Amino acid sequence: MVTSAFIWGLGDLTAQRLETRHREQPEKQMQWRRFALQTTYASCVWTPIASKWYCAVDQLARRFARPRTIKFVACKLGFETVGLHPFSLAAYFACLGLGQGRGWASTQSKVARDYWPTLLFEVALWTPLDVILFAFVPVHYQLLATDLGCFAESTVLSWVNAHGVASLLENPRNL
């Protein structure tokens, strides 16, 4: 939990630091509430789910393929892409939106606007990382290895949560 919170928090601080390059008033203070929400999400939502998820996916994939085979990695990748990414992204937007006091209608609007482009980014980021993860990292280290990849993801997600995905699509140099 502490590792996930630290890495996700570091991702948010990185996103906020990058944002100072684009503000008219770069001396604006860090948004500590936003940082606290990111770290709380990572430790209280992401970590408990992910720690169980990787063990369950490993056991489920063993029903269809032998470990350390291409088929085994493909099974785990399929479960991850269909079963985890869509739900974890929705949970992220919901938790952060409500935690920031946006209200249900505003959070739904944000999800409707940013969900699909962000999910495509997430799948593009995680597919190669997941192949390496599932092929070479023992299941009991997969959450830690995932947390390292989460640094890039949490940086982008924090930016998208604060500014919307359109700001990245219009100008990818924002990051």
Image (cartoon, rainbow, N blue to C red):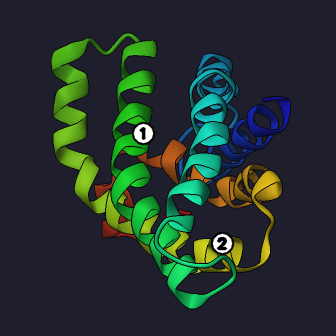
Q: Nearer the viewer, residue 115 or 2?
A: 2
Q: Nearer the viewer, residue 38 or 126?
A: 126
Residue 62 placed where, x, y %?
Answer: 57, 66
**CA–CA distance in space, label 1 to label 2:** 29 Å
Would you call the spot at circle 2 few (<14 residues within 10 Å), some (14-19), or many (20 or more)?
A: many
Foreground label between 1 and 2:
2
Residue 108 placed where, x, y %?
Answer: 19, 28
Looking at the image, residue 69 lies above or below residue 16: below
- Helix, strand or loop at label 1? It is helix
Q: Earlier in the sequence, mark 1 or mark 2?
A: 2
Image mark for residue 123: none
Looking at the image, residue 71 lies above or below residue 53: below
Residue 95 placed where, x, y %?
Answer: 43, 23
Q: Nearer the viewer, residue 111 or 42?
A: 42
Image mark for residue 134: 2
Count how many numbered circles sit on residues in the image.
Answer: 2
Q: Is residue 18 left or right of residue 7?
A: left
Q: Amino acid at mark 2?
A: Phe
Q: Which residue is mark 1?
A: 161
Residue 24 placed where, x, y %?
Answer: 52, 42
Q: Are marks 1 and 2 in contact (CB under 8 Å)?
A: no
- Helix, strand or loop at label 2? It is helix
Q: Tell me which corner region of the image, top left, top right, bottom left or bottom right, holds residue 7.
A: top right
In percent of the image, x 40 and y 70: which residue is there? 78
Q: Quadrant of the N terminus?
A: top right
In percent of the image, x 28 and y 61: which residue is there? 117
